[in-house]
Image (spheres, rainbow, N blue to C red):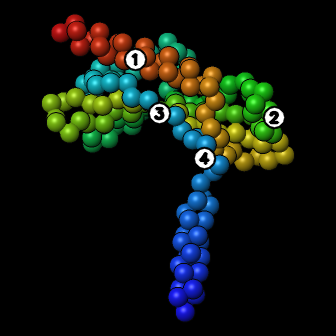
Amino acid sequence: MMLTKKISATLLISALIWIGCSGAPSGAITEYRTTVGTATIDDFNMLSNKLLNRHRYPVDRTLDRGMGAIIECKYKYPDISNEEALKGIREIRYILTVEARAKGSGGGMYSVRVLVRSYGRFGGNEDWVNIPVNDETKRSVKSFANDLKTEFENKIRSF
């Protein structure tokens, strides 16, 4: 009787772990996020648009939310790396989003971060699926985020 309970408990735990992990892709992170810093909503809108243009990220839409704002760019279609080609990916694209969220302390300051989602299209399939963000895209986005952070800091110092 005791052995049956141990086996049942072990099977139940194994089943829960298997079910919990089955939805996760092979451990690869398909979204890249980086925190930029703090800014007012006016500085966020003005400086983000200026830097997005400088880094050649065309803005698709801007959404004002009650507690912040989101700037969503159009898809970019970079070249495929050798690693992605070996995985069978024939086309990739990514989308950059810059978002400002109101800080809890108030004072009109917003926490700004940049998010990137990457999608791939495999040979023989027309569907776009989430894929890990490649290193080249990360470098490009990190460069944008660093420049935006510098602009925010310079704007704060000018007061």
C-alpha span from label 4 to label 3: 16 Å
Q: Which residue has dot 4 on it?
A: 27
Which mark is on residue 33? 3
Could you tell me the amino acid type at mark 3? Arg
Disc 1 to disc 4, C-alpha distance: 30 Å
Judging by the rendered image, the residue that carries numbered circle 1 is 148
Q: Position of residue 40 (x, y in %)?
A: 25, 24
Mark 4 or mark 2: which comes first in sequence?
A: 4
Distance from disc 1 to disc 3, alpha carbons, whole Å, reads 14 Å
User: Up-down: is 27 above or below 101?
Assistant: below
Label 1 or label 3, whichever lies nearer to me, is 3
Q: Secondary structure at mark 2?
A: helix
Which residue is at a point 59% across and 72% down the rendered structure image? 15
Q: Nearer the viewer, mark 4 or mark 2?
A: 4
Q: Earlier in the sequence, mark 2 or mark 3?
A: 3
Disc 1 vs disc 4: Cβ atoms closer than 8 Å?
no
Of the numbered discs 1 and 4, the one sitting upstream in the chain is 4
> Label 1 sits on what residue type?
Leu
